[in-house]
Image (tube, helix red, strand yellow):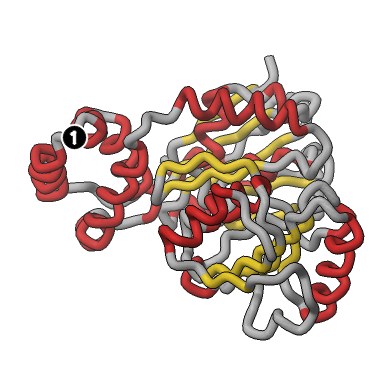
Amino acid sequence: MKYFPIFLDAKNISAMIVGGGDVAARKIELLLKSTTNITVMAESLSPSVQRLIDAHELHWLTHNYKSGYFSGINLVIAATDDSDVNKAVAAESQPLNILTNVVDQPELCTYITPAIIDRSPMIIAMSSSGSAPILLRMLREQIEKTLPNGYGKLADFSFKFRDHVKARVKGLRNRRTFWESILRGPIGENILQGNVQEAEQQLITSIKKEIAPPVGEIVFVHTLDGDPDKLTLQTHREMQFAEAVLYDDDVNIDLIEYIRRDAEKYPQSITSTILINFQHAIELAENGQKVIYLLAGHTALPDNSALAASNIPTKQLISGV
């Protein structure tokens, strides 16, 4: 990745906007979604910037850019139409390790602002690394259409009951399955419709029921030519619930990106065409884990007496057909 994605804690932001025009106004509006700890440095202001300063009581330095005002600042945006001024801002801020954004001059930036879909507290940030803004806009439009406006209510609801569910539903995979059924089902629909009290009662009833401990499972995935774009929906879903993944050097490493990020990774030194590590997979599954075993190509699994005797549920998926 050319850029490392990161979310900043808004309470720690101390921002400086250099410039007072319409571009500065858009940057201020974006920052105001998170913080009012904003200083504007500009001799003259557009009506939009003046309105934002007045409405939110922002600090205004009533002169154009001058060096020496970045003490206590950790984020700087140069939003002037003077390239020499923008370069001077970057030249001062970057040696101070201040996050720096220069509008329309990515070579002077230490960070870029992503495209944002705001369903607070759910936030989706996307970037094309500056290479394809039109493609990025198209992707944003697609995602916007799929997310209900009240999607953030689901996150608030989940947070409110997170500790209750964790205490009642044992096992990470059980909790993942439980929450998915809650948020995709009638309870989630009630939340989106604004029937929060009814949804809360339904959830309380659900967690009072006896929930079995997690049962281990091994899913063998034959990846054929290893093309990630050919992953089937079923394979993708299984991979998202994985708690452990085994794979060898013949497997396309790009597929690992589709495994749940906090799953344990177990690269195998011996290719599966010579030896499939049934024993390790069995041990993991016996401890209640969902194990994904990625296999390059598609060859029949050899019989294994230990696996047959274990009574561990298994699946075989062919991904890419």
Q: Is residue 207 visible?
A: yes
In depth, the one of 69 and 209 nearer the eye is: 69
42 vs 311: above or below: below
* Residue type at the position of mark 1: Gly
Q: Is residue 279 visible?
A: no
Q: Decide: few, some or many residues near mark 1? Use Cα within 10 Å; few <14, some 14-19, many ≥20.
A: few
The structure residue drawn at horizontal position 75% and vertical position 60%, both measured from the top left corner, is: 78
Query: Residue 34 at x, y = what percent?
Result: 47, 59
For this view, does 222 lie left or right of residue 308? Answer: right
Residue 303, x across and y down, in percent:
62, 33
Tag 1 secondary structure: loop
Q: Position of residue 175 (x, y in %)?
A: 33, 50
Q: Please count the marks in the image.
A: 1
Q: Residue at x 75, y 45 (%)?
A: 275
The residue where tag 1 is placed is 194
Check the image and name the residue furthest to the front: 44
User: 202 or 97, which is in the foreground?
Assistant: 97
